[in-house]
Amino acid sequence: MAEKIHPLVNRKEELAEHILVSHITSVLVVFLAIIALNVNFKLGQAVTGTLYYYGTIVLFLLVAVIPYLSKKFSSKPWTGEALLLTILFPLIMVLIYLTKGFDGSKVLLFVPVVIAAGSYGKPIGVLSALIASTAIFVLDMRQFFTNPVSPAFQIDLIYMGILVTIAWLIGGLTDIERRTHLQLLSLANTDTLTGFINHRHFYEKLTEELEIARVNSKPVSLIMIDINYFKFFNDIYGYQKGDLVIVEIGRILEGLISPPSFVARYGGDEFVLVLPGLNRLEALHKAGEIEETIKNYSIEGDHTQPGGKITVSLGMACFPEDGKKPRDLVKAADDACYQSKHSRSRICFSVIDQLYSLSQPEKDLFDCFKALLTVINVKDRYTFAHSERVMAYALAVAERIDLPEEQKTELRYGAYLHDIGKVDIDAGILNKNGPLLDEEWEITKKHPVWGSDIVRPLLSLEGLVSLVRHHHENYDGTGYPDGLTGKNIPLSARIMRIADSFDAMTTDRPYRKGMTHEEAIEELKKYSGKTYDPILVEAFINTVK
């Protein structure tokens, strides 16, 4: 679906086109005047006719082409107009001089005055009119002493008055249009509450920064910030007090960054920071600084919040690792923020923060997997947050038992994809408020097999298929789908079994309240050696504690 062009952009482009056409028309008028004046006043008598006409064509090309080509090589606005005026003013004055002050030739002075007023506004326009009037007056001084009340001089006084009036009028309208455009642009791009750029303009700015980063091979980091329990705060104190909190948080964020970094208000209680040039580690340090500063900042009413403080959840993503397009990068940061909000960690990266082990075709395939997971999330949002937390638990255990990096990578992807087979399960089964029927349970038990078939094309991750297939196997052989026992179950799948179960036990579901961590740990101990690998249970409990 094509991006809609903002009306202000259309307005600016239409005005620019209108001004450009008027300038080209003005140049054509000068060009035609040169030819006409040559016919009527024999300007070509001093040189050969052929040389004159060729010179006229060259002058036209210089006046018409060079100024506008200059715009392609200069980022400064109105450079073409400045060059055009530099050429036109002397050229017209030469024409007036050669025609010995013929009144018709003086009309051409309106051309540079109109261009100056239309391009630069009233001050420059009036100045150009005064310069043109002065030039006319100086030319008239040649005849002033011989014929002080010359009719030509009287007509010139009228010219001078009209020149200044036109410059004042056109320049004034130009200034009004420019101020109006800036005001409308500010209203369109700025959040009225905080004064930061708004959601729409954020994407425009981010697109620009990513393009600069792409050209210069530099990183860009995003930090998504979400105020925790903000609805709870609004319910107690009202939305006006809530707005003050948003403004205070915004001021804190603004004080912690410097250009070219910028902050935008992304949504109701969400901000996003764009940090050009900062890599993953530097962004993590900045996120820690933000989290600590806000946590230590005293805001009226924060004592009613959990923990007695206003806190935030932060999700991060980095260009180009987590996405190369603006919306992909924002989606990665938003997912990480959701993970942060529903886990013990207040700062999280996107769950798949490194794809270095995948080939380009596999990365493209992984994008398809993300689309499937989005479908599952729509059916059951629990699945997404669950996968994020399972990954955190599994990787923590992997660190404790010193698992090789290759297996940690498999766990990272496996945690993200282990429930992908649920894409074929009806939402009514996934969200059923009560025990499943036998036939529903049989369908649910097939999701590890379906999931393993889906991820099979990821050839770079050899153990991923068995991890997804066997993450519901029990240590005593009572699990599914293959009833494997003990060490016959892949190590990564045994780790996943514990992490998966622990998170399921401690998470609220439609049909029951989640256990406390202490209750879940007792449950793991109870089924150690039966459902779970006893050695891994011990490592997991020590990790959780």
Image (spheres, rainbow, N blue to C red):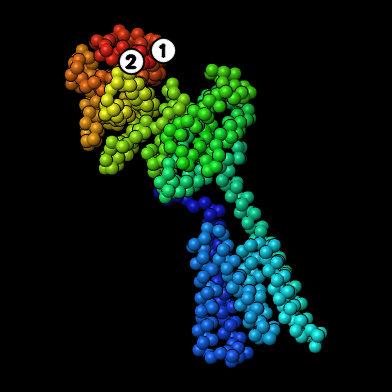
The answer to which quarter of the image holds residue 192 is top right
In the structure shown, which secondary structural element does the residue marked by tag 1 occupy? loop
- Which residue is drawn at the image coordinates 42% and 23% (left, top)? 343
The kind of residue tagged 2 is Phe
The answer to which quarter of the image holds residue 339 is top left
Relative to 16, is 426 above or below? Answer: above
On the image, the x and y values in percent for residue 275 come to 49, 39
Q: Which residue is mark 2?
A: 540
* Labels 2, 1: front one: 2
On the image, the x and y values in percent for residue 229 come to 52, 24
Q: CA distance from mark 2 to mark 1?
A: 16 Å
Between 230 and 109, the residue placed more toward the observer is 109
Give residue 7's mark. Answer: none
Mark 2 vs 1: CB contact within 8 A: no
Give residue 516's mark. Answer: 1
Mark 2 closeness class: few <14, some 14–19, many ≥20 residues within 10 Å: many
- Which residue is drawn at the image coordinates 52% and 41% (left, top)? 261
Give the quarter of the figure containing the C terminus.
top left
On the image, the x and y values in percent for residue 483 come to 18, 18
In the structure shown, which secondary structural element does the residue marked by tag 2 occupy? helix
Mark 1 closeness class: few <14, some 14–19, many ≥20 residues within 10 Å: few
- Which residue is drawn at the image coordinates 65% and 54% (left, top)? 179
The answer to which quarter of the image holds residue 89 is bottom right
Residue 347 is at least partly visible in this image: yes
Relative to 198, is 142 above or below? Answer: below
Residue 480 is at least partly visible in this image: no
Q: Earlier in the sequence, mark 2 or mark 1?
A: 1
Between 521 and 408, the residue placed more toward the observer is 408
Between 465 and 251, the residue placed more toward the observer is 251
The kind of residue tagged 1 is Thr
